[in-house]
Amino acid sequence: MSEQLQQVHLNDTHVALGAKMVPFAGFNMPVLYSNLIEEHFCVRQKVGVFDVSHMGEFILKGPKALDLIQYVCSNDASKLVDGKVQYSCLPNEQGGIVDDLLVYRISEQEYMLVVNASNIEKDWNWISSHNSFGVEMTNLSDDYSLFAVQGPDAINVLQKLTEVDLSAIPYYAFTIDQMAGMDDIIISNTGYTGAGGFEIYVKNEEALAMWNAIFQAGEEFGIKPIGLGARDTLRTEMGYCLYGHDIDDTTSPIEAGLGWITSFNKTFIASDIHAKIKAEGPKKKLVGFEMIDRGIPRQHYPLVNAAGESIGEVTSGTQSPNLSKGIGMGYVKTEYAKIGTEIFVQIRDKSLKAVIVKMPFI
């Protein structure tokens, strides 16, 4: 039985633009508009717009909102001040990850959590089940559209639409202000491409007007709509984790190199299990690797040593447009995680040589 695919608010706009639509995280999403390489470089060199309205947004409100966040999230949200964002994860009770997410502090008693599309219901139920703090929770996921305007010219495009000094919004910060004549727009600087830019959260009823305003302002900069295909090549070049690929319910944040979002100066769900993994050292680690032999690594391809013994598997892989070679991420036994170590990727019965490198790849 296949579940009905959900649609982002501007679904018909993407279809009209000729986008190739595919199922992704339970949504019908644009994967490609023109050509993947073209879209990738449009973002790296100029400016492109992703419709990522499939993401989920929860508002947590009340005197104990921070207490709930501190308990369900691994990072220390007490460090946040108004207008700041923090990357975090929801640890599970087995030492794995329920989801990774962004925590926005709107005020001392109000926070917005931005979660992955595939996990909206799962995350909502998980946080709700631990809400013994009387925190008022609202799920706004169906009410908001989200556009990621990314690339070196993103700031020039969006500055035409707002009085807010966008250059004054540092990385991992946001403001709520007017843009394109619309009020209460969340303008955020958290990008997932490594090319700079902003995310614009807008109510669905104003989404089309905002989309059109952005494209009108961006015309002189060669702005283009960008699909999920280029989003994946861009984030892989930066070594950014994707839930369901590089992290999931079975991977520890410590194994994934996310120790920096795991704060042990507070108690969170199963913090003792995560502390133990950290103290004992993880048995496997998430690494980045570049292909030496020609080949494109893909999720679940086996990783082996020179003797052909299994040492792990690929979690994300692609042909890097910037490097013109195959790159990937994957978990390997810790003894193979050192930079410079040669490993082999099994692609269609062939063992192809690769080398562990420091991320980001570019």
Image (cartoon, helix red, strand yellow):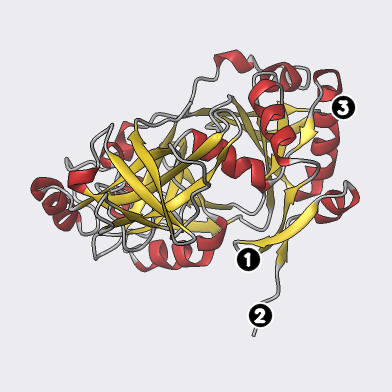
Q: Specify the farthest residue to the right.
A: 16
SS at mark 3?
A: helix
Query: Looking at the picture, does residue 161 appear above or below residue 123?
Result: above
Q: Earlier in the sequence, mark 3 or mark 2?
A: 2
Q: Which mark, residue 2?
A: 2
Q: CA distance from mark 3 to mark 1?
A: 31 Å
SS at mark 2?
A: loop
For the residues carrying marks 3 and 2, which lies nearer the camera in this image? 2
Image quadrant containing the N terminus = bottom right
Q: CA distance from mark 3 to mark 2?
A: 38 Å
Question: Which residue is denoted by mark 1 in the rendering?
Answer: 26
Q: Which mark, residue 216?
A: 3
Q: Which mark, residue 210?
A: none
Q: Earlier in the sequence, mark 1 or mark 2?
A: 2
Say what amino acid the circle numbered 2 marks.
Ser
Decide if residue 63 is in sight here. Answer: no
Query: Looking at the picture, does residue 265 appear above or below residue 298?
Result: above
Say what amino acid the circle numbered 3 marks.
Gln
